[in-house]
Amino acid sequence: MIFPRTPSLVFWLVALTCAGQAGTTVYQKPSDFIQAACGGSLPPTQALDLTAVHQARIKRLLGHSYRPSRVRYWTSGKRMVVILEEIGKTQSITTGLVVSGGRIEQVKVLIYRESIGSEVRRTSFTNQFKGASLEGSGKLSKRINNIAGATLSVRAVTEMVRVALYLEQVRPK
């Protein structure tokens, strides 16, 4: 044989390529989350057009520009349900959030696309946000514990919570 290690080399190249790619895990479809958060029915979709003022405030909350110029949301009584996406390390994390009276009621990671850090989907992490509100400085009223190895995912979910709280403040009532 001329290249006795070729099969081994090919195996390792394929393994390393696959390890570097993120897998997509759907924990709950966004439409199912909205329906569950709204008591079993799917209310009409509402939209908030983000003005330059809104965009500037969201940029301060996120630390970077926010691309969408319109955010869709749903209401059930005084509760607002919103689905947001934010980049963790390299891939977006889709999260469902329920806000009422300026406080977080529920946070749920719906779709996770990163290769590491999926611990942010656990209720032991997301329950930390319950009751949190947005202070004038843009910080949350509660301290959120980090997860070792998932720092960027924790940051992304925390940023989405802050944006959801802000959107609840500025949406038409």
Image: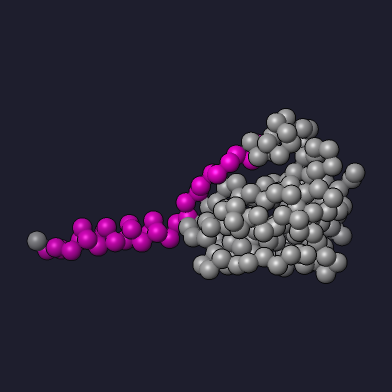
Q: Position of residue 76 (x, y in %)?
A: 80, 37
Question: In which quadrant of the rendered view does residue 125 lie?
Answer: bottom right
Question: In which quadrant of the rendered view does residue 18 lie?
Answer: bottom left
Q: Residue furthest top?
A: 41
Question: In this orientation, does residue 163 appear?
Answer: no
Question: In this orientation, does residue 37 appear?
Answer: yes
Q: Quadrant of the N terminus?
A: bottom left
Indicate left or right for 142 with 33 as reference. right
Indicate left or right for 111 with 83 as reference. left
Q: Residue furthest left?
A: 1
Q: Position of residue 57 (x, y in %)?
A: 82, 63
Q: Residue at x 52, y 56 (%)?
A: 118
Q: Residue at x 83, y 65 (%)?
A: 135
Q: Position of residue 83 (x, y in %)?
A: 69, 46
Q: Residue at x 33, y 57 (%)?
A: 14
Please give the range of residues in magenta.
Answer: 2-31
Q: Is residue 45 magenta?
A: no
Placement of 42 over or under 54, stated as above or below: above
Q: Residue at x 71, y 39 (%)?
A: 37
Depth check, front residue: 110 or 53: 110
Q: How many marks?
A: 0
Q: Quadrant of the C terminus?
A: top right
Q: Position of residue 112 (x, y in %)?
A: 55, 51
